[in-house]
Amino acid sequence: MVNEIILLLDNTKIVRKKHEVINYLNNHNITSQEIYAWLLNNQNNSNSVFLLGIFNHFGIEVNVNEQKAFELYQNVANLGNVFGITSSGYCYNYGIGTSVDNKKAFELYQEAANLGNSRGIYNLGYCYSNGIGTNIDNQKAFELYQKAANLGLLSGIYNLGYCYEKGIGTNIDKQKAFELYQKAAYLGESYAQYNLALMYENGEVIKKNMNQATYWYEKSAEQGNQYAQDRLNELKKHE
């Protein structure tokens, strides 16, 4: 169960992680109190310690405690736990429970990527895209997004599509971008849903279809994408 939750979270955006954990527990008729107590009593397994870090990070059954989460991520990272390594990198990247240290974040993402972790690979690509702890290298970013996408990471699929749409690290290929957005959108990636809606609205690559555009804006907005909600509001004004 712990491993299932961790693998689920590895392919989930930060803003959705708490929601996904609660959903998983509800679907399996497990209370957050039960699993939290179990985690406290099973600290000999690094994945259990990591998940306890998640609970502290996002305030599941306990108050948000980012410093405690960071410590737990670090503890398991030091044991070679790839999820702990990636999450420690994220903490350094965004100052979660520690000071921002982009160089350290980059190094940890690189370590996780070398271990084959799709989220680590994606985050490393993001570093190359944005010059976080390293120089900007769009071609390297593209290659890493492609690798993460091939491993099934939704963020990787979306960002690969974005690279094709904008010609980042590769030639512009809007047909390929459309296909990748569509793939990620059907799998629930909110930004892909938004970009797919834009393509339908603007008639890019695909024939203009406002029904499809509205459908995907709504799907994206349901997940909290403000851009999609704003676009829906604009469309309603002109009905």
Image (cartoon, grey):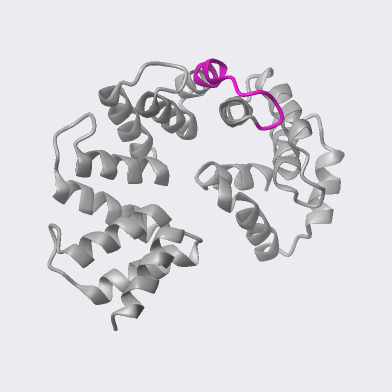
Quadrant that contains the C terminus:
bottom left
Residue sitting at x 34%, y 21%: 136
Q: In front here: 115 or 237?
A: 237
- Whether residue 189 is visible: no
Q: Is residue 139 left or right of residue 65?
A: left
Q: Is residue 114 magenta?
A: no
Residue furthest to the bottom: 239
Residue sitting at x 63%, y 20%: 80
- Whether residue 113 is visible: yes
Location of residue 50 with respect to 155 vertically, above or below: above
Q: Is residue 237 left or right of residue 70?
A: left
Location of residue 87 with respect to 5 vertically, above or below: above
Tell me which corner region of the image, top left, top right, bottom left or bottom right, holds residue 42: top right
Q: Is residue 224 left or right of residue 71?
A: left
Residue furthest to the front: 237
Tell me which corner region of the image, top left, top right, bottom left or bottom right, holds residue 92: top right
Find residue 177 and report its horizontal and vertical position in percent. 22, 48
Q: Is residue 99 magenta?
A: yes
Find residue 61 and report its horizontal and vertical position in percent. 80, 52
Find residue 16 and report its horizontal and vertical position in percent. 57, 53
Q: In front here: 216 or 5?
A: 216
Location of residue 191 with respect to 215 vertically, above or below: above
**How many badges with numbers are in the image?**
0
Tell me which corner region of the image, top left, top right, bottom left or bottom right, holds residue 7: top right
Location of residue 71 with respect to 48 vertically, above or below: above
Find residue 65 and report its horizontal and vertical position in percent. 78, 39
Magenta-tinted stretch? 96-108
